[in-house]
Image (cartoon, rainbow, N blue to C red):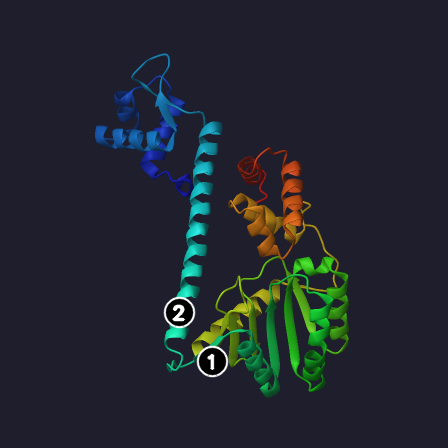
């Protein structure tokens, strides 16, 4: 039952037996559980490592189990710290991989790699995208994880988007939920919808992605600096996976024209996602980036969630959200 929190079956049995018989010693636990003395002591050592057992104040030398309400908070805190550390390792690995790809492209610009083309610099990226848009015949699928766009950027995109839709190209774009708070971005999306483009929103997106005719995909080398470099992918297996990713996200996304709804917890999709990120140990800055909002907005959302949960810290918010089933 508690394996997800780091306790194996035998260690959990020892902990439960100590709670049921707080005055019992190792011999009592061994008889009650029908375990060997080595297994009992191994369980006690593990419980001590996790902070679930401490020396008794009344009977020095005898182990005492920590109460479940405190013990479960200790285990949850440990697990949240491990999740935060794992997320940090993932982000560091992603950055290292992007750096390696970039360095490899610089060292071997003429290398022939089947299904992979490296683009270095914003000029090269824009030239390649312009060519892809001229060559597209049927469909364009886009992940747009940047959140609100400036009016100038949207105005600059109009001729190309209008040209594609005028040629009968099917266009589907998935934005971040946060664009709903940007009047000029919504107005632009509605203008495109009038020309036949479909748009939906989700709280977060995994990557920036453009797929044309299900045969070519463009993704940035570095998600933090999309102008630095990009990779054009044409391998069949890669495109099959990326198209499947797009379709799965599209199925769960909400049409941009629909009003934002709250779930049974009273949370919007953005708030529910922010709560999960908060519980996973993300900073306000990291949450802002994932949601495509300002640092101030991310802090306001996090503070609001903590107030609704009656929590005074991020850890406490995670514990309370878990107890109330908000993170299920």
Image height check: is 61 above or below 114? above
Residue 124 located left or right of residue 83: right
Q: Which percent across, then down, holds residue 116?
A: 43, 78
Circle 2 SS class: helix
Mark 2 in CB contact with mark 1 (< 8 angstroms) = no
Q: Which residue is drawn at the image coordinates 75% and 70% (left, top)?
A: 188
Q: Residue at x 46, y 37 (%)?
A: 77
Q: Which residue is mark 2?
A: 103
Left or right position of 198 against 104:
right
Determine which of the numbered discs, if any, sits on residue 248 in the image.
none
* Secondary structure found at label 1: loop
Q: Residue at x 69, y 78 (%)?
A: 161
**Mark 2 to mark 1 CA distance (whole Å):** 21 Å
State how many labels appear.
Answer: 2
Q: Is residue 328 visible?
A: no
Q: Which residue is at the far top?
A: 58
Is 72 situated above or below 3? above
Q: Tell me the quadrant of the picture where the N terminus can be found.
A: top left
Picture coordinates of residue 20, whole percent (x, y): 40, 23
Q: Residues within 10 Å of mark 2 (few under 14, many from 20)?
A: few
**In the foreground, 147 or 7:** 147
Q: Residue at x 57, y 70 (%)?
A: 247
Q: Nearer the viewer, mark 2 or mark 1?
A: 2
Residue that carries the numbered disc 1 in the rendered image: 234
264 lies above or below 243? above
- Tell me if mark 1 has few (under 14), some (14-19) or many (20+) residues whose alpha carbon lies within 10 angstroms of its own: some
Q: Quadrant of residue 133?
A: bottom right
List x then y, in percent, for residue 155.
Answer: 73, 73
């Amino acid at each position: 039952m508690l394996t997800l929190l780091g306790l194996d079956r035998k260690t959990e049995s020892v902990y439960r037996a100590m709670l049921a018989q707080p005055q019992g010693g190792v011999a009592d636990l061994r008889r009650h559980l029908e375990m060997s003395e080595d297994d009992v002591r191994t369980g006690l050592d593990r419980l001590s490592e996790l902070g679930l057992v401490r020396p008794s104040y009344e009977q020095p030398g005898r182990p005492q189990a920590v109460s479940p309400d405190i013990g479960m908070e200790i285990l949850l805190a440990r697990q949240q710290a491990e999740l935060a550390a794992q997320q940090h390792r993932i982000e560091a690995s992603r950055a290292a991989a992007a750096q390696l790809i970039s360095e490899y492209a610089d060292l071997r610009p003429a290398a022939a790699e089947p299904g992979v083309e490296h683009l270095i610099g914003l000029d090269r990226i824009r030239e390649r995208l312009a060519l892809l848009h001229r060559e597209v015949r049927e469909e364009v699928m886009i992940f747009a994880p940047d959140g609100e766009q400036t009016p100038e950027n949207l105005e600059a995109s109009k001729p190309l988007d209008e040209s594609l839709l005028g040629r009968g190209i099917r266009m589907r774009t998935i934005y971040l939920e946060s664009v709903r708070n940007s009047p000029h971005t919504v107005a632009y999306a509605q203008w495109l919808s009038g020309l036949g483009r479909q748009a939906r929103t989700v709280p977060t997106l995994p990557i920036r992605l453009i797929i044309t005719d299900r045969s070519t995909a463009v993704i940035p080398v570095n998600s933090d600096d999309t102008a630095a470099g990009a990779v054009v992918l044409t391998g069949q297996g890669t495109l099959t996976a990326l198209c499947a990713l797009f379709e799965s996200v599209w199925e769960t996304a909400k049409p941009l024209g629909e009003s934002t709804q709250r779930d049974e917890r009273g949370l919007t999709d953005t708030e529910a996602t922010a709560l999960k990120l908060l519980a996973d140990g993300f900073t306000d800055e990291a949450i802002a980036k994932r949601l495509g909002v300002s640092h101030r907005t991310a802090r306001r959302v996090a503070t609001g969630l903590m107030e609704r949960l009656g929590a005074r810290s991020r850890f406490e918010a995670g514990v309370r959200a878990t107890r109330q089933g908000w993170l299920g």
